[in-house]
Amino acid sequence: MAVDPVKQPVGDLAARALFGTRAGDLVSSLIALALMSAVSAMMMAGPRVYATMAADHALPSALARYSRRGVPSIAVIVQCVLAIGFAIMSNPDQLIRLVGFTLALFAALTVGAVFVFRARGKVAAYRTPGYPVTPLLFIALSLWIVYFGASADPKLSLEIAAVLVVGSAIYLATSRTKPRTPIEADE
């Protein structure tokens, strides 16, 4: 049975063309292992982000509760429910595009904050090597990923943008009445 080359992973195709079938299998296995480790890391980091945001009054305070062993257990449950919901309700291709689009967009915004902090005179213990070229290059590449994703599937990109706009509006509406965190008060 022939495999459709359009649906075959590019890493597998390249390894098979350069080094043969066994190398293609090995590269595919390594890519799968790398993806599983990335998912595992996000499953551990995500709930801690929720817990920190809840401690800063940006999310419901229940998410900031930790178990005796230091695990944000309610945030872990919320992360699992969200992940299962997305896996059941979405098609994998759209889910990967959604995640890639939002991660690239927020990575660009996060790195762009370096320029904002420097303009405000903030000095960090860590200096960005190659500043300002390296952060500008990272932002440009991230925005290229966003552009490529938007041009490949404009409908999905509009849906993602709508979710981000609604989420931002809700955050702005609810954050005005909350006490400022120590970081915000320091500014």
Image (tube, grey):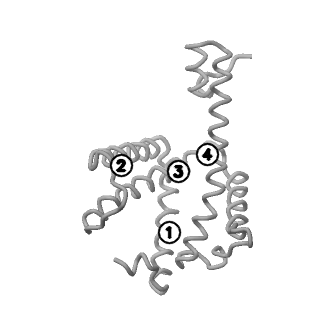
Q: Amino acid at mark 1?
A: Val
Q: Secondary structure at mark 4?
A: helix
Q: Which residue is mark 1?
A: 166
| 137, 7: nearer the viewer | 137
Relative image position of residue 168 (x, y in whole percent):
47, 69
Marks 1/4 in contact by CB < 8 Å: the verdict is: no
Q: Secondary structure at mark 2?
A: helix
Quadrant showing the C terminus = bottom left
Q: Which residue is mark 3?
A: 156
Mark 4: few/some/many CA within 10 Å (<14, 14-19, 20+): few
Mark in front: 4 vs 2: 4
Mark in front: 2 vs 1: 2
Q: Earlier in the sequence, mark 1 or mark 4?
A: 4
Q: CA distance from mark 3 to mark 2?
A: 22 Å
Q: Which mark is residue 7?
A: none
Q: CA distance from mark 4 to mark 2?
A: 22 Å
Q: Which residue is mark 2?
A: 139
Residue sitting at x 47%, y 47%: 154
Relative image position of residue 116 (x, y in whole percent):
30, 63
Residue at the front extreme, as displayed: 125
Marks 4/2 in contact by CB < 8 Å: the verdict is: no
Q: CA distance from mark 2 to mark 1?
A: 24 Å
Q: Earlier in the sequence, mark 4 or mark 3?
A: 4
Mark 3: few/some/many CA within 10 Å (<14, 14-19, 20+): some
Q: Is residue 62 above or below residue 30?
A: below
Mark in front: 3 vs 2: 2
